[in-house]
């Protein structure tokens, strides 16, 4: 949430700046799309094959390796002091899960991933009617694996007693937080002056392969490949003001 608040602040400032410059010069290719915010379903393609390789040992079916559908939002505004450049922000995330009942235990695995970032893009000025923009996302991303084994219901006293007695209730959260600079390309097609549709793609480059447990302790021996870079495809509908 704090990431999106920062991005909203950036968008408002740049919008005010754009209005100031517009008062001094006519709108042309520089600002054929003004400013907008919207909903951005995102299809992410992380490498979860190393995780699927160990799931049969837990009696759980493989997680879908074709990709993860996530949801989020974003926005942008043109900064008219730099021709054809716009800045904004985006955030998205999603998860997949599988579970199985093994005897008296219910085992479950959840894999989650996403990112939140500042966006800087350059819109190609020689393409009219639509905006084709190349740029980058600069921000943070995350990957998370949750593993659960539950055999009984929960009570307050029962949870406290688990620290003194053996238990078959197990939960683990493994986290990989990373910095990313991700190249992107986006196509925004305006339906009218107030609504536009987006189709784009990007490549998440992660700069940390460190995984930690829920208490921040580093995990050694994590399978190779779980921290690989990955592609994503983004769609969306944006509402704002678009100069055609």
Image: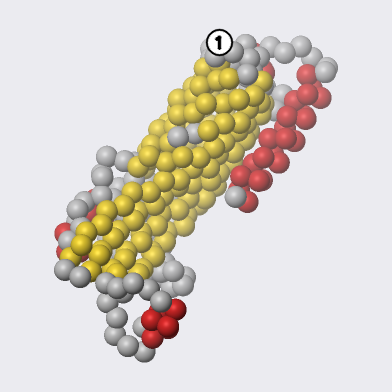
How many marks the image carries: the answer is: 1
Residue beneath label 1, please? 129
- Residue at coordinates 72% horizontally, 24% vertically from top-left? 80
- Residue at coordinates 23% horizontally, 69% vertically from top-left? 105
Q: Is residue 53 above or below residue 181?
A: below
Residue 129 visible here? yes
Residue 55 visible here? no
Indicate the quadrant containing the C terminus: top left, top right, bottom left or bottom right.
top right
Q: Is residue 24 above or below residue 224?
A: above
Protein image colouring? secondary structure
Quadrant in the rendering for residue 222 = bottom left
Query: As drawn, which residue projects farthest toward the bottom?
Result: 164
- Of 200 and 172, the residue lying toward us: 172
For this view, does 164 lie left or right of residue 129? left
Secondary structure of the residue carrying tag 1 is loop
- Of 143 and 228, the residue lying toward us: 143
* Residue 103 at x, y percent in the picture: 16, 68
Q: Is residue 39 above or below residue 211?
A: above
* Residue 208 at x, y percent in the picture: 44, 57
- Residue at coordinates 45% horizontally, 35% vertically from top-left? 41
- Of 131 and 182, the residue lying toward us: 131
Q: Residues within 10 Å of mark 1 (few under 14, many from 20)?
A: few
- Residue at coordinates 40% horizontally, 33% vertically from top-left? 233
* Residue 39 at x, y percent in the picture: 53, 33
* Residue 169 at x, y percent in the picture: 31, 74
For this view, does 140 lie left or right of residue 85? left
């Amino acid at each position: 949430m704090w990431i999106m608040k920062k991005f909203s602040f950036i968008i408002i400032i740049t919008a005010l700046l754009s209005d100031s410059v517009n008062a001094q010069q006519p709108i042309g290719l520089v600002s054929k799309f003004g400013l907008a915010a919207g909903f951005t379903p995102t299809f992410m393609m992380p490498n979860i094959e190393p995780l699927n390789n160990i799931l049969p040992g837990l009696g759980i079916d493989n997680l879908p390796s074709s990709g993860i559908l996530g949801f989020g939002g974003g926005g942008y505004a043109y900064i008219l002091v730099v021709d054809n450049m716009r800045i904004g922000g985006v955030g998205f995330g999603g998860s997949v899960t599988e579970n199985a009942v093994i005897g008296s235990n219910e085992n479950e695995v959840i894999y989650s991933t996403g990112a939140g970032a500042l966006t800087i893009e350059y819109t190609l000025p020689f393409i009219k009617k639509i905006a084709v923009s190349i740029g980058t996302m600069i921000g943070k991303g995350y990957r998370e694996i949750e593993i659960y084994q539950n055999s009984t219901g929960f009570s307050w006293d029962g949870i406290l007693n688990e620290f003194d007695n053996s238990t078959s209730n197990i939960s683990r959260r493994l986290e990989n937080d990373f910095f990313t600079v991700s190249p992107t390309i986006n196509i925004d097609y305006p339906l009218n002056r107030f609504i536009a549709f987006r189709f784009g793609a990007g490549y998440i480059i992660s700069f940390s392969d460190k995984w930690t447990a829920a208490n921040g302790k580093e995990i050694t021996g994590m399978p190779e490949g779980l921290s690989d870079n990955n592609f994503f495809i983004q769609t969306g509908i944006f509402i704002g003001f678009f100069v055609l």
